[in-house]
Image (cartoon, grey):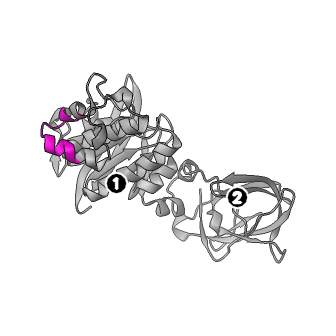
Amino acid sequence: MPNSVLEIQNLNLTIEGKQILSNINLRLKKEEILCIVGQSGSGKSSLLNCIAGFIQGFSGDILYEKEIITHTPANKRNFGFVFQDYALFPHLNVEKNLLLANKDSKVINDVLKWVNLTEHNHKYPHQLSGGEQQRVGVARALAKNPSLVLLDEPLSNLDQMWRGQLKVQIKTLLKEKKKSAIFVTHDIEEAIFLADRIAVLHQGKLLQIDQVERLLSHPKNFIIPQIFGLNSFLKGRSLQNNQFKTAIGIVNINKSHYSQNDLLYYLPENLKISLEQKEHYTALIVKRKHYGKGHLCYDLVQIDNDFMLRDIHLPQNLELGDSVYIKLDDEKEYLLF
């Protein structure tokens, strides 16, 4: 990959006989924000700590700007690290916490401006809100003028308002200062907003690394859509000529992804929905869900075959018990798992 700033080669980590990370290979592009997502215990933070130098004893190599740094101590790597729990010294005010990262007071004044904390420079951590403390954590990471910024779930301890504000500030700062960054999160919406690409970890294995659109349209593993909150699978049976029969239509299967498996993956936008029967299949609305700014989505039960379709967007607001008519778009290609 051209312009890669960080490369991980065949990284394996075992702790007390348990395999934590298995054969991890990835590259980070220059000035890229890469988010690592996965379920709890998938190895996200462990991978970040290996990159930072906080964890040693793994096999494989880590290269930064084409030089091996696998055994370089953490304090010798020019990386900034933003911790989940802020990790500020309680007996030092904001300015003195930052001076530990860089003794140049001009630099400290600059980073305080970047995170809008200039007026709080003499306050102590207990005098700050959680969001303000984490902004100090971000400022401290940037005060080193790091070549790479590592962020370990930095927003997870904040309330919704602070999370929304700080994720915008973090992305803006990283892009303005042209920093490469790896951001670990369990919040999928957060990752989608922040990331240029997303790496999906599951049980210590890197399933796929790609742009979110590609992860959802061409997942390499059926776990990936589920991590993104999509349970868009239908059972059926294979036909001739790369076709597949489901309860709501016969469709074409992507030739490069054709198999004898009986689980078809579809995107919600692949459903053709009508309020008139036409050649569609009948479904009943069994649940209405409200989310942000008055929007609705629905759970549907397909009557003839008694299976559920979840989180479906409909062309207008409808009530429980109303009928709609659904069909898979037969002009699209689908994947089997």
Instruction: Based on the picture, tell me whether residue 104 belongs to the magenta stretch.
Output: yes
Q: Position of residue 233 (x, y in %)?
A: 66, 56
69 to the left or right of 295: left
User: Considering only vertical position in the picture, is 46 above or below 244?
Assistant: above
Secondary structure, magenta segment, majority class: helix
Between the C-alphas of marks 1 and 2, the distance is 31 Å
Q: Which residues are magenta?
A: 98-110
Q: Is residue 66 above or below residue 60?
A: below
Q: Amino acid at mark 2?
A: Leu
Frontmost of labels 1 and 2 is 2
Question: Which residue occupies the foreground of this view, 96 or 331?
Answer: 96
| Residue that carries the numbered disc 1 in the rendered image | 33
Crowding at label 2, few (<14), some or many (≥20) Cα neighbours within 10 Å? some
Q: Nearer the viewer, residue 204 or 289?
A: 289
What's under tag 1, amino acid-wise? Answer: Ile
Q: Is residue 176 visible?
A: yes
Q: Position of residue 183 (x, y in %)?
A: 37, 46
Inspect this view and state whether residue 146 appears. no
Q: Position of residue 10 (x, y in %)?
A: 30, 44
Mark 1 or mark 2: whose residue is earlier in sequence: 1
- In the rendered structure, the answer to whether residue 247 lies left or right of residue 244 reads right
Quadrant position of the N terminus in the picture? bottom left
In the picture of the structure, the residue carrying the numbered disc 2 is: 296
Q: Is residue 292 left or right of residue 97?
A: right
Q: Is residue 286 left or right of residue 296?
A: right
Give the SS element for disc 2: strand
